[in-house]
Amino acid sequence: MPGPKDLDPSSSPRALLGAELRHSREKAELTQEELGAPLFVSGSFIGQLEAGTRRMQPEYARQIDEILGTNGFFARNCKASTKSKYPDHFAEAAEAEAIATTIKEYAPLLIPGLLQTEAYARAVFRAYQPTATEAVIDELAEARLDRARLLDDPTKPLLWTVLDEAVLRRRVGGPAVMAEALRHVAGLARQHRIIVQFLPFSAGGHAVMGGALKLMAFEDAPPLAYLQGPGAGQLEDDPATVARYELAYDLVGASALSPQQSLALLESVAEDYAHEDQP
């Protein structure tokens, strides 16, 4: 009986690899927990691999082939599922973000990538890489705008973001760039496409002062938390850890301005930047 065919990298490799993993596991009559045990991972981790929310690493692929008797299928196709246009520290989070049903994000310094305009994104990347060629900046900005097309769907995913007041005050790219960027976020809020809140400096200390936090929920897989710092990121799937970050996000949201107050502040500051840019 022929084994499974190799995956087509032009399709959605990670989703196809996950579907084949589920099929092979069920054919072997193993539960997710039973497959995870010899890999020293949880059953929920196997579920995330099957749902396509986690990336299959080569060492897991080789062991899975041995356990399920799949003749090297997962080892051969693992590379196709790990190709990404995003930096290594963010690639897995970006791919999970693309299939999330709900995204909740706290941003301490910058407008989140999904909400950035092209000019703002280019200014951010230029600040990160002051000696990069224009071609490199073009490529980075294009990848970021491609991520933002996630919001072209009128209802999914639900995006709820809490922005620190520092996001408003940090003049990324200058007044004109800031005015356009803030108006873009305000427009999405006015269209009821996103929920946005601002956490004022007057709120004082809060539960997520360590850095940026992104929470992602999925239709048929456990939730994930992503923590990001300069040039680094960490994806968390431990249920207790994710629950702790969910509570932290809720506490920050409780300290933030209401969506109505936040929208008024957003539009007011955008106008200030626009007037400042006038000769």
Image: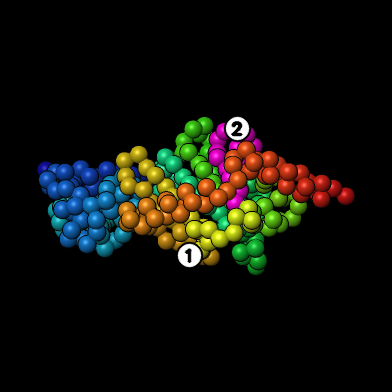
Q: Which residue is under mark 2?
A: 191
Q: Is residue 156 left or right of residue 53?
A: right
Drawn side of residue 64 relative to residue 92, left or right: left
Q: CA distance from mark 2 to mark 1?
A: 33 Å
Q: Please state the total of marks drawn on the protein image.
A: 2
Q: Secondary structure at mark 2?
A: loop
Amino acid on which the number 2 mark rests in the picture: Gln
Please give left or right for residue 1 compared with residue 78 in the image: left
Residue nearer the viewer, 260 or 203: 203
Q: Name the residue: 64% across, 57% down.
A: 201
Label pair 2/1, CB-CB below 8 angstroms = no
Figure coloring: rainbow
Residue 212 shows in the view: yes
Q: Position of residue 138 (x, y in %)?
A: 61, 54
Amino acid at dot 1: Ala
Residue 150 place in picture, x, y as percent: 50, 40
The x, y position of residue 100, in whole percent, is 41, 43
Q: Which residues lie in the magenta part?
A: 183-199
**73 within the magenta span:** no
Residue 137 showing in the rendered view: no
Please report whichever mark, 2 or 1, sits nearer to the chain's N-terminal start. 2
User: Which residue is more in the foreground, 19 or 106?
Assistant: 106
